[in-house]
Image (cartoon, helix red, strand yellow):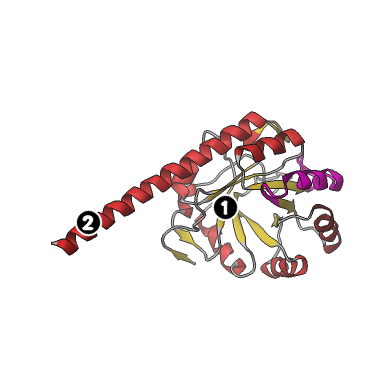
Amino acid sequence: MTHSGTTEASGAGTIKICGLKTDEALDAALDAGAEMVGLVFFEKSPRHVDLATAARLGDRARGRADIVVLTVDADDALLDEIVHAVRPDWLQLHGGESPERCAALRARHGIRVMKALGVSGADDLARATPYVGHVDRLLFDAKPPKGADLPGGNGVSFDWRILRDLVPGVPLMLSGGLDAARVGEAIRVSGLDAVDVSSGVERARGEKDPDLIRQFIAAARAAFATRDGAASSCDSSKDESSQEGVEA
């Protein structure tokens, strides 16, 4: 794993709204311009959806955003059923799936795989290396509190500075404790080009708030634009300085 430059080049950044269960919440995410929408298949989660609901929401989102289905150590039979019904663009694996398991699922279903890894400190980042070449994206989420029932969506965060200039060889996404008030700082501090939110856009546990979704996407988009504008200005200054040197 090396440290250099930015983690990925994705233009104006990538925003994912996860744990969607209703048309209203999904439409808010789509209309506000989210690039990814997440559907959760984990019965312990208040964001869990059944196959029929997920299929309907997937059809509603298709062509407007990438459809991501989140599972936790699901077996082949369940994943076959989900993929057949929902036809997602991504599998998000949020359990203890090994690099080999991720690679096998990517080959079995022919769709992209995102692996979530829990992070509490810099030592946890080494866990990313074995997944390079086996997944299409890594999602760094805060490790769940001790005794938590859910592997993610717990509203906790970690020190985003440890991600600065991290380049593991695969695109990255940041999650954990984000909301409209904090996502701009998270983007600035981490340097990442992709963010994911679930509990941070809820009015109650598992209940998405369309206004909070819109606010989050607007805040993230503004932060990406500010950062990209600053980078462009810096590059222009370097070009002008180089030209002056040539003319001299």
Above-or-below relation of 248 to 186: below
Is there CB contact under 8 Å for labels 1 and 2? Answer: no
Q: Residues within 10 Å of mark 2 (few under 14, many from 20)?
A: few
Where is residue 26? Give x, y as percent.
71, 39
- Residue 195 disc label: none
The image quadrant where one finds the C terminus is: bottom left
Q: Residue at x 84, y 61 (%)?
A: 80
Relative side of 174 to 231, left or right: right
Residue named by callout 2: 241
Where is residue 115? Give x, y as percent.
65, 59
Q: Residues within 10 Å of mark 1 (few under 14, many from 20)?
A: many
Where is residue 28? Give x, y as percent.
67, 35
Relative side of 245 to 157, left or right: left
Q: Quadrant of residue 204?
A: top right
Q: CA distance from mark 1 to mark 2?
A: 34 Å
Query: Can residue 183 be seen in this snapshot?
Result: no
Relative side of 132 to 188, left or right: right
Relative side of 226 to 123, left or right: left
Residue farthest along the left direction in this orientation: 248
Determine whether the residue tagged by mark 1 lies in a helix, strand or loop.
strand
Where is residue 139? Give x, y as percent.
60, 54
Amino acid type for the residue under numbered disc 1: Met
Residue named by callout 1: 173
Query: Can residue 147 be seen in this snapshot?
Result: yes
Q: Residue at x 24, y 55 (%)?
A: 240
Which of label 1 and label 2 is nearer to you? Answer: 2
The disc, 1 or 2, on the residue closer to the chain's N-terminal end is 1
Q: Nearer the viewer, residue 241 or 7?
A: 241
Q: Which residues are magenta?
A: 42-67
